Amino acid sequence: MLSRNAGLDTVRGVSNLAAGRLYGILDLGYVAQSDARRTVAAMIAGGVDLIQFRAKNLELAEIARLAAEIHSETSGSDVPLVINDHAEIARDIGAEGVHVGQNDQSVAAAREIVGAQCLIGKSTHSLEQATRAMAEGADYIGWGPLFATPTKPDYVPIGLGNIAAVHAAVTKPIFCIGGIKLANLPQVIASGARRVVIVSGLLQAANVAEYARAAKALLDQKSEIRNQK
């Protein structure tokens, strides 16, 4: 798991972010508010390396309240909490990160709000966007959607073809996202992915912790093979 307890780079996640492989998103489109904290605990138990909180259809005050509640759960572990979209909420509750999309505020604007000791991730959908996000100072990028996904129904899948190319072009950690599930994870890994985000497959699993462990095992196995070469 990622540590937040050993200096500035680690607090921001820069030095240990490369070790993270499985990124889970707690999306309230799939999980009831009353189950949010329990689901986060299961994600942590399953070995998820980062957790993002996404709540698209709630009032800001309610998002902030839930985010603080979830952060009280993640704070007992070494798993950073990343807030989707709302840098002010990330700052106010002391979350470890914020994630912005292409149509959200810039990385620089988010950095002004959250400060230096906070991860900033950015969603990208093309090689141009990925290299631009790196130049803007994003600590990591999301790359996708690889497959069609109900989470982002208006986005055209970008497929697996450029996974190797984006890893060659971008030196920051890259988390592939979009329609990734256990069934297609081996294919995603074989295409060059080193880190992935899983949303619906994880959240809708009968056992969230076991699903996370299975995904992490596949990613760990590939990482071990890569390190032996």
Image (cartoon, rainbow, N blue to C red):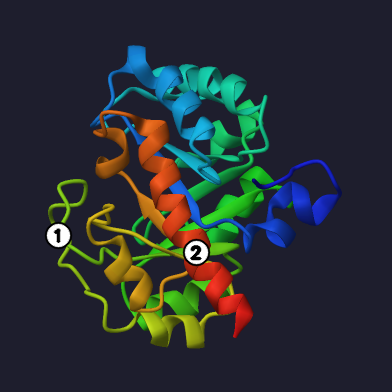
Instruction: Tell whether 179 sits left or right of 171.
Output: left
Helix, strand, or loop for circle 1?
A: loop
Residue 133, percent from left and from top: 49, 71
Answer with the quarter of the image where residue 91 lies: top right
Instruction: Tell whether 222 sits left or right of 36.
Output: right
Write the residue at 54% across / 69% down: 223
Eyeballing the image, is 33 above or below 192? Answer: above
Q: Which circle's residue, 2 or 1, is located before the other in the chain?
A: 1
For disc 1, the marked residue is: 148
Residue 94, percent from left and from top: 66, 31
The amino acid on which the numbered mark 1 sits, given as a three-letter code, is: Ala
- Asked if one can make out residue 24 in the rendered structure from this viewpoint, the answer is no
Answer with the quarter of the image where residue 184 lies: bottom left
- Asked if one can make out residue 28 in the rendered structure from this viewpoint, the answer is yes
For disc 2, the marked residue is: 221
Write the residue at 14% across / 59% down: 148
Q: Going by the picture, which residue comes out furthest to the top?
A: 34
